[in-house]
Amino acid sequence: MQLTSTQLATLAALANGIIPPDHRDDGAASVEAASRLAARIQAGTNAALYLQGIQTAEALALKLHGRILSELTPSQVHPLLGALQDQIPAFFKQLRIDVSALYLSSPDVWQRVGFPGPSALSGGYPDFDQPQTQRITQLKEDPIMSMSVHPNVQAFLARPGRMLIGSEWHENGQWIDAIDPARGKAIGKFPAGTEADVNLAVKAARAAFNGGWRRMAPYERGRLLQKVAGLIEKNAEELAQLVTLENGKPLWEARKEVATAVSWTDYYAGWTTKLLGDTIPISLPGQFLNYTVREPLGVVAGITPPNYPLTMPLYKAVPALATGNTIIIKPSEDTSLVALRLGELFLEAGIPEGVFNVVTGYGETVGAALANHNDVDKITFTGSTEVGRLLVKASAGNLKKVSLELGGKSPNIVFADADIEAALKGVFMGIFFCQGEICSAGSRVFVEQTIYDDFVARLADMAKSVRLGHGLDPETKMGPLVSREQQQRVLDYIRIGTEEKAELVAGAKSPDGALANGFFVEPTVFAKVNNDMRIAREEIFGPVACVLPFKDFPEAIAKGNDTPFGLAAGVWTRDLRKAHQAAAALYAGTVWVNCYNAFDNASPWGGMKQSGWGREKGPYGLDLFTQIKSVIINYT
């Protein structure tokens, strides 16, 4: 089937409502997304749903405005989208998912209009890599009390957080302050869990597992997880603000995390009915049927880091629950409120008692108790390699299964034949996105000698232009680090870098003035780094780029692989042969070519060497939470 020109124009106008144009692309992004989406529809993907939606949208435009939809202004399209959401929610949801995914995944779009997307003024993401006239935003006196904070967030922060154990909310009289890292001020509190709390949670999770959760019809499990996804989407702005207030990342980035949380939960909800086994031809004498089934492991403990306080608990919980396990989430003590709010949404969705539990507290108490507990069947952990080693040792008691997504010191290699503009943006985003607090950060930037000096100078200029500020300020491009401890760790490494005689070309300070009480560190660039320096070998987990020169392909690969880590790597080149050779030679769980930090729910994620065990995401993630049972039947 072929869409008419009118239908294509309607689709572009609807996409324009999802992706507002900015001053540079003048709607090119939405036209690009619409044309790509049209190709899918014409190939039959969700065609009936889209044709219904387009027809309804055209009718609404004529009814409400007396004009075709493509002639409407953005201010007229937005209410129409709201009407579509009410009338045909399935179409609206699919449109938003598809348009956003096409936009974020298409280099043809985002390299042209700039990453991460349309400016904040037009309702989209800020132009993270663009120069700005003012380096530091003026922090409002008390943004938590401003009208910009969602009333539900204010109400949530006003009451003490409580642990979710079974279907009850628990406290034990011991508390940890939740800190807004942009101001260094407490915004709430949550319990400091104990071993006794862990024991209660494990008992509740075991009872739920044995009591029928694993035997629930797969379709019903999937429906419950879809309800969770719907509630996350319904409360998206509230969750994004809570992420910003507790983690510090800018609101535009927090909103992106919420969108990922929705798509992730939807994705694995769909896997509940697709956990297939095999039939195996065996060679025993007689007649035998051999088949396999996937079965859940039992009680899972998910221990998560602070950098993605919403998606990380879901990365552990959703595939675990989809495969019939129960789970106890132990969130980072730096960002526990988000996980507790997530627990409320799981209960609201109707998840049975004991299936999803949240125990807050310190790693040395709650984390250790979970790792040592003999009735926990699996530990899934994202965090530092040092803690990963401790968890492996602790798991030996009952030989519980362990999967680990650990540290990284990822090489991002730029060859002289690369698209330099795209490489600059990719390198910049690869290290400074999420304040550098991301395991895959491209913290070792290898640049071919012939372009090294110019590339370093331009990267430094970009770093100097980044506006720091509170994440609730729409003009903020980079927020604070998550804790005072992490801020000091990063500043210590910057000091070490200068002592090692690396050349400091940008950043290196913690700002004073209005931001002095926050946990900020300026985006920092070191040049003339060699691979033996500590700043090039140890994970800093902050906004610090180490730029190293190389003379040819063999040296780039050798230096890139010269690390105990193997989580990710990046390659920038126009030479297809060189790209394939580099991807084959680099020892990393993921190699990005002419992109960086390009993640998808269906694509496996995990590390080699000391960057971890196992693969999350996609069908590979199901292996982390299931075990194979072989059944052999003699029917001779």
Image (cartoon, rainbow, N blue to C red):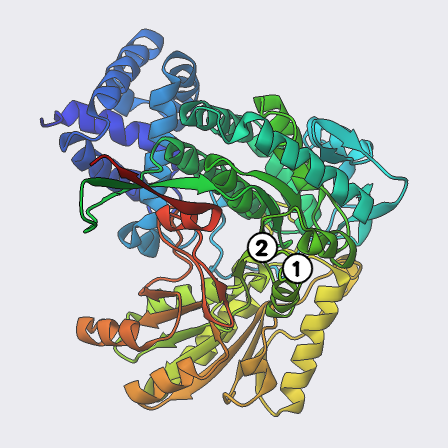
Residue placed most toward the observer, 524 or 209: 209
The answer to whether residue 245 shows anywhere in this view is: yes
User: Looking at this rendering, what residue extends furthest in the right direction?
Assistant: 173
Q: Residue 8 sits in which quadrant?
A: top left
Identify whether 521 is placed above or below 456.
Answer: above
Horizontal side, residue 593 vs residue 465: left or right: left
Horizontal side, residue 81 vs residue 522: left or right: left
User: Looking at this rendering, what residue extends furthest in the top direction?
Assistant: 63
The answer to whether residue 511 shows anywhere in this view is: no
- At mark 1, the secondary structure is loop
Task: Tell me the tag on residue 397.
Answer: 1
Q: Are marks 2 and 1 in contact (CB under 8 Å)?
A: yes
Q: Which residue is mark 2?
A: 400
Q: Position of residue 452 (x, y in %)?
A: 39, 84
Using a 10 Å C-alpha cutoff, classify the residue at mark 1 as few (fewer than 14 neighbours), some (14 to 19) or many (20 or more): few
| Amino acid beneath label 1 | Gly
Residue placed most toward the observer, 411 or 25: 411
Residue in the picture at 27% in, 10% down:
59
Residue in the picture at 59% in, 61% down:
437
Task: Tell me the tag on residue 360.
Answer: none
Q: Position of residue 1 (x, y in %)?
A: 9, 26
Using a 10 Å C-alpha cutoff, classify the residue at mark 2 as few (fewer than 14 neighbours), some (14 to 19) or many (20 or more): many
| Amino acid beneath label 2 | Lys
